[in-house]
Image: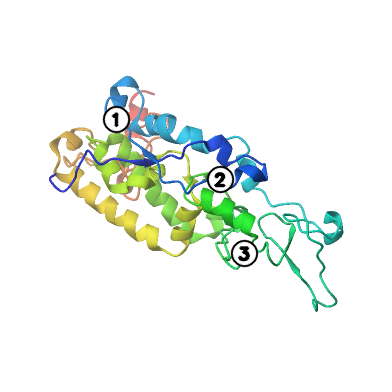
Amino acid sequence: MSWINQNQVTFNKPNNLLGLFSPSQETLHHEPIEQFTKLPPHLYTKHKGKKPSQILYDEIYKEIIETPNINRFLQPPPQQELKDQNFKCWQCQKEISNGFLTIGANCDQCFFHGRYFCNDCMSVVRMPIPWKALDNFDLRHYKVSKLAQSEIDKLYALPILEIPPESKLLQVNKTLFEFLVLKRQIHLLYDMICDPKLVQTLLDKRMNLCLKRNCFSLKDLYEIYNGSLTKVIQGYYIILFKHIDVCKSCQKRGHICSICKHMVPIHAFDIKNVTYCDTCLKVYHRECIESKSCPNCLQYR
């Protein structure tokens, strides 16, 4: 596999996470996150018995996903009126007004904080809002304050937005549902491939897609929304699938369908064509097991 440089394996992991997500306004102005950390090969032996995706979570993503105070980014802010702020800008405390029928207004409401800011403290750049992305996959750009823009910029690439499998959002949004099917394939493939570094080299800073939990960054969701990330990950999946198809070590990790007994190994990550018994975890072709009971379970009844 000469096209892969296995030494260039990096992950996105910022320093000082507690400071980054501190609720105080004084800690919001940090330098842009440019630091990455490597997952050295010896960790796979250090965590003997754990699957690669669990090692990845424990060593790289746990600190990010479980950061204290993270919920304040994921919940809609309480509705505020100008009088609740004593008619003062939430940031600079300048006196502000809605004017008369918007005439003479010198403020606007930030969709991220739910507070009112003067025109000087409002940003001219509109941003997607994390809780709106989680609530109904709304990735449109909204008016925000400069303070909110700074906060959203810092969390934009962090996989802190989790979509549980039972989310109603998956029932109504085909784009998101299909991507989660693809993500599930990548996760299962990562846990069975002969060398996890092959996946790491391709996905690079998107290794959160190999986790069992559906944790996304705002950047991930926006690129799923516009279709660009789906095309990229589909391309990576095809590359990795082709590797497994010719790799003797990977083929040994496959299964033989005990119904059709076809000697070409099948793999659990190929979830569109393969399924498994919930009781014994035996793997079968979907078309073979369809409307039949598991032969393995029947044998031991």
Q: CA distance from mark 2 to mark 3?
A: 36 Å
Q: Nearer the viewer, mark 2 or mark 3?
A: 3
- Within 10 Å of disc 1 (Cα), the crowding (few <14, some 14-19, many 20+) is few
Q: Nearer the viewer, mark 2 or mark 1?
A: 1
Q: CA distance from mark 3 to mark 1?
A: 41 Å
User: In the rendered image of this protein, does residue 38 appear above or below residue 232?
Assistant: above
Q: Please say if the residues under marks 2 and 3 sit with CB atoms less than 8 Å apart.
A: no
Q: Please say if the residues under marks 2 and 1 sit with CB atoms less than 8 Å apart.
A: no
Circle 2 residue: 166
User: In the rendered image of this protein, does residue 135 appear above or below residue 261?
Assistant: below
Q: Nearer the viewer, mark 3 or mark 1?
A: 3
Residue at 68 percent across and 61 percent down: it is 121
Q: Nearer the viewer, residue 291 or 18?
A: 18
> What SS does tag 1 mark?
loop
Residue at 79 percent across and 76 percent down: it is 102
Quarter of the picture containing the C terminus is top left
Amino acid bearing label 3: Ser
Residue at 48 percent across and 46 percent down: it is 158
Q: Position of residue 242 (x, y in %)?
A: 19, 49
